Amino acid sequence: MLLRVGGVKIAVLGIALSFGVQADEAPVCQLEWHNRLSMQDGALNLELEGESFQIEPSGQLYFGVHKVKLSDDQSALLADYHRLMVDDLPYTLSHSQLIDQELCDRVAMRQAKESEIQSQIPALKRWQSVTLD
């Protein structure tokens, strides 16, 4: 996954993270990151197996430079996902080495939203940024 916030870019690809709150504690949860994503100029950029997608704050989806035709419900779903990620990415970056319960809860919400996206938007049927074990 590629995270970019405020011009700072961090790449995480297929790495399982399982840090606990304290060194002697069991991990709160285990995360496995998939694919790449970044936020730039207000748009959420998704990279999936060499394909690039962009989600605008309005929920409009682009495949490369091509606008993807979406229903109003699909656009609303992507707008919700965009808002979730705008809030989630800074928190995720700030907790990349210390996984706490809030991060696990955020990842569970993200995973649920991505599952909904997979079932409703054919172009993103394989999209996921993280799985929670």
Image (tube, grey):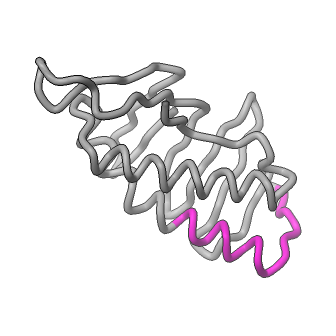
Task: Please state which of residues 29 and 15 is positioned toward the viewer in this rendering.
Answer: 29
Chief SS of the magenta region: helix
The verdict on residue 2 being magenta is no
Q: Where in the figure is residue 14, as x and y percent of width and height?
A: 53, 21
Instruction: Indicate whether 44 appears above or below 67.
Output: above
Q: Would residue 103 be found to the left or right of residue 79 on screen?
A: left
Q: Where in the figure is residue 26, as x and y percent of width and height?
A: 23, 23
Q: Would residue 60 be found to the left or right of residue 99 on screen?
A: right
Instruction: Indicate whether 106 appears above or below 47.
Output: below
Residue at figure coordinates x 50%, y 64% from the top left: 42
Residue at figure coordinates x 60%, y 58% from the top left: 113
The verdict on residue 71 being magenta is yes
**Location of residue 99 by image quarter:** top left
Task: Please state which of residues 126 and 42 is positioned toward the viewer in this rendering.
Answer: 126
Q: Where in the figure is residue 133, as x and y percent of width and height?
A: 49, 30
> How many marks overall?
0
Q: Would residue 51 be found to the left or right of residue 96 on screen?
A: right
Q: Would residue 69 be found to the left or right of residue 12 on screen?
A: right
Residue at figure coordinates x 51%, y 52% from the top left: 110
Task: Please state which of residues 125 and 41 is positioned toward the viewer in this rendering.
Answer: 125
Residue furthest bottom as drawn: 72
Residue at figure coordinates x 27%, y 45% from the top left: 101
Instruction: Indicate whether 8 appears above or below 44.
Output: above
Task: Please state which of residues 64 and 128 is positioned toward the viewer in this rendering.
Answer: 128
Residue interval drawn in magenta: 66-82
Q: Where in the figure is residue 107, as x and y percent of width and height?
A: 44, 47
Residue furthest front as drawn: 26
**Location of residue 61 by image quarter:** bottom right
